[in-house]
Image: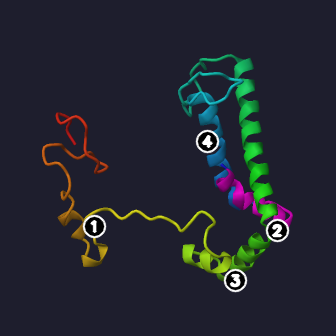
Amino acid sequence: MCMALGGRAAEAIIFNRVTTGASDDLKKVTKMAYAQIKQFGMNPNVGYLSFPEEDNNGLGKKPFSKHLAALMDEEARRLVARAYYQAQKILVDNKDKLDVLAEALLDREVLNYSDVVDLLGPPPHGPKKTVQVAGWDLDEGDDAPLQNLSEGVEQDKPLTAAGAVSQDSNQQP
């Protein structure tokens, strides 16, 4: 959540105002907060309860009281606020790095990983780890990933749609 709110917090710190540019991030964070509270039972004040996602039509009866709904709203607000203030604290504590990145973004508009490493130095917890799918060589053309897809896969177990080996050999891919 802190990472998603970082752009909004950076706008507030650098420009002393917040624009609508980070509104999609705010929607995602709000959805994450409600999911933690309502679906995953990750809030001690609401308890170990799980409620289904609400339909967009809003016509069905909610399986909880108005009091519990108000508590979930308050807990979601509190969770998002904590994440936002944590993001602000991290950015203020690293204002020198934020200023360098802000200047570079104003100059170039887009920064990739190597640009950030060039500007700030290597990450404190080691370099970024990338995952290479075994048997995929994207330099050989568009069909190369499909040619070696079955290498290293047990032939008697089907692949799921995501390409992982299914645990149930009777299950259809």
Q: Which percent across, then down, holds residue 71?
A: 74, 25
Q: Which percent across, then down, holds residue 110?
A: 61, 76
Three-letter amino acid code at the position of disc 3:
Asp
N-terminal label among 3 and 1: 3
Residue 107's mark?
Answer: 3
Place residue 35 in its image quadrant. Answer: top right
Q: Which percent across, then down, holds residue 77?
A: 75, 38
Q: Is residue 20 visible?
A: no
N-terminal label among 3 and 2: 2
Three-letter amino acid code at the position of disc 2:
Ile
Inter-mark Cα distance, 3 to 1: 36 Å
Report if the CB atoms under discs 4 and 1 are less than 8 Å apart. Answer: no
Residue at 76% x, 44% y is: 82
Give the structural element (helix, strand or loop) at label 1: loop
Circle nearer the viewer, 3 or 1: 1
Inter-mark Cα distance, 4 to 1: 34 Å
Q: Which percent across, then down, holds residue 6?
A: 71, 58
Front-most of residues 118 and 81: 118
Front-most of residues 169 and 30: 169
Residue position for label 2: 14
N-terminal label among 4 and 1: 4
Three-letter amino acid code at the position of disc 1:
Trp
Which region of the structure is painted magenta? 2-18
Asked if the stretch drawn in magenta spans residue 16, the answer is: yes
Inter-mark Cα distance, 2 to 1: 43 Å
Residue position for label 4: 32
Q: Main secondary structure of the magenta part?
A: helix
Circle nearer the viewer, 4 or 1: 1
Three-letter amino acid code at the position of disc 4:
Met
The relative height of residue 172 versus residue 47 in the rendered view (above or below) is below
Inter-mark Cα distance, 3 to 2: 15 Å
